[in-house]
Image (spheres, rainbow, N blue to C red):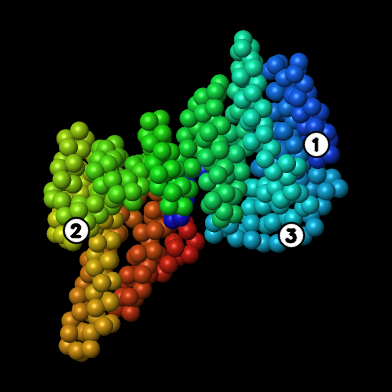
Amino acid sequence: MKKILIALAVILSVQVAGAQVKSAADSKKAVESAEAAAQNPKKAVKPATWLKLGNAYMDAYNSPFGNAWVGAGQQELLLIMGGEKPSSTETVELMGEPYTKEVYAEKNLYFNRAGVLAMIEVTKPVYDDALAKALDAYVKAYEVDVKHSKDKDVAAGLQNIATKYLDEGMTQYMLGNIKGANACFSAASAAAETAPLSVIDTTATYNAGFTSWSLQDYSSAVNYFKKCVEAEYYEDGEVFAKLSDCYSKLGDKENAKNILEEGFKAFPQSQSILIGLINFYIESGDDTDRLFSLLDEAKKNEPNNASLYYVEGNIHNQLGDKESAIAAYEEANEVDPNYEYGFIGIGILYYNEALDLQTKAQEELDDAKYMALVEEFEAALKNAIDPFEKAYEISKNNEIKVNIAEYLKNIYYRFRDQSADYQAKYEKYDEVVSTGNPL
């Protein structure tokens, strides 16, 4: 199951079908006229002058998009865009998914499998810095507006800029340009914080932090992730894990530990936080009992939360304590018999044990020892069958069931020649995996 660890923004800055978009030439004329007015001392003291300049730059930014908008159908755009035809079309892969790329004079359009426009990449902007120029103009409008009569208009302009930067950041990220994405996300975050809008755009701020972290700019990432924590935006605990990692990379071990423990109290199920804590205590040589103390505190608050026992099992498993891990997973099942992850935890534990034994067997040259390892390998695989079967039976989530079926398919394949039942089970789960449809 793929997971992109970046907050995906809803594309808000779409062009409305049928809306009039200025041509590049008209946009330039409008900007030049507005710039001239802003140079006039009498007009420069009026907020309307700067608002007009900001709007002119925004029109110039929008010009290359034409009548295309994200969410439009490919056939729909053929009618709306009229005589505008692509110079070439090709299939490209972005983030592991195929897209149809249509190349135009000023832009590239990317359509997903369903034929829906997913992304617009502007290749020939009217001005390279239109959004930055628009931002400067709106800031100037706010500065000269001593009565603050235009605050609402300025705030709307700033919000529009923040949204455009966020959209552009997502485009650059999808194209694999992390540095460009980071610049856009950072600009979106800054625009949202600019007065009089003065808000924390949590999506832009998290994405700015994530891309800073990806670029190993840990100091910048710390600033963005701290803003997320202050705004109570956590991305299911991922903010704490990433912030801790940044502190660790910067040599601040104390803050690295403290932020993980703070995050663990709020998100004890977060695997990123859990692995971060385990690694921290193992690398630091500190007493790993602290991990179980934190879990005990969580259990006191939620004694019937089966996931806490599952997490405890994962800790024991990571630390190599098989028996304690199984006991914790079983306790999760006792607390909630319909909690599939307890059974999944046991199944994966045995399955991974089998893989380790298989590797050892392949490296063993002594025939007797080899056969003994093969027997242990097969025993471990068979031990995984029952918990996986139970997890498959009780799970209500089709995606989880398909993932479980993948394990069971592989196990039954090994034993398919031993009995008709094993052969039937192999065929059953092979069909589930191939169709993606649990029986």
Q: Which residue is mark 1?
A: 28
Of the residues shown, which amino acid type is indicated by label 3?
Thr
Considering the numbered disc 1 on the image, is that residue within a helix, a strand or a loop? Answer: helix
- Image position, residue 375 (x, y; %): 20, 78
Of the residues shown, which amino acid type is indicated by label 2?
Leu
Query: Height in image: 321 above or below 260?
Result: below
Quadrant for the C terminus, please: bottom left
Query: Height in image: 217 above or below 20?
Result: below
- Image position, residue 287 (x, y; %): 13, 50
Q: State which tag comes first along the sequence, 1 or 3.
A: 1
Q: State which tag comes first along the sequence, 2 or 1.
A: 1
What's the CA distance linking mark 2 and mark 1? 64 Å
Of the residues shown, which amino acid type is indicated by label 1?
Lys
- Residue at 77% x, 52% y: name it: 104
Front disc: 1 or 3: 1
Which is more toward the observer, 161 or 147?
Answer: 147
| Residue 380 in view in this figure | yes
Q: Which residue is mark 3?
A: 89
| Residue 264 in view in this figure | no
Query: How many numbered discs, if any?
Result: 3
Q: State which tag comes first along the sequence, 2 or 3.
A: 3
Which is more toward the observer, 321 or 202?
Answer: 202
Locate residue 10 relative to residue 391 in the image: left or right: right
Considering the numbered disc 3 on the image, is that residue within a helix, a strand or a loop? Answer: strand
What's the CA distance linking mark 1 and mark 3? 30 Å
- Image position, residue 322 (x, y; %): 17, 61
What's the CA distance linking mark 2 and mark 3? 52 Å
Which is more toward the observer, 142 or 241?
Answer: 142
Q: Which residue ends up furthest to the right in the rendered image?
A: 83
Front disc: 2 or 1: 1
Q: Which residue is mark 2?
A: 319
Q: Which residue ends up furthest to the top in the rendered image?
A: 147
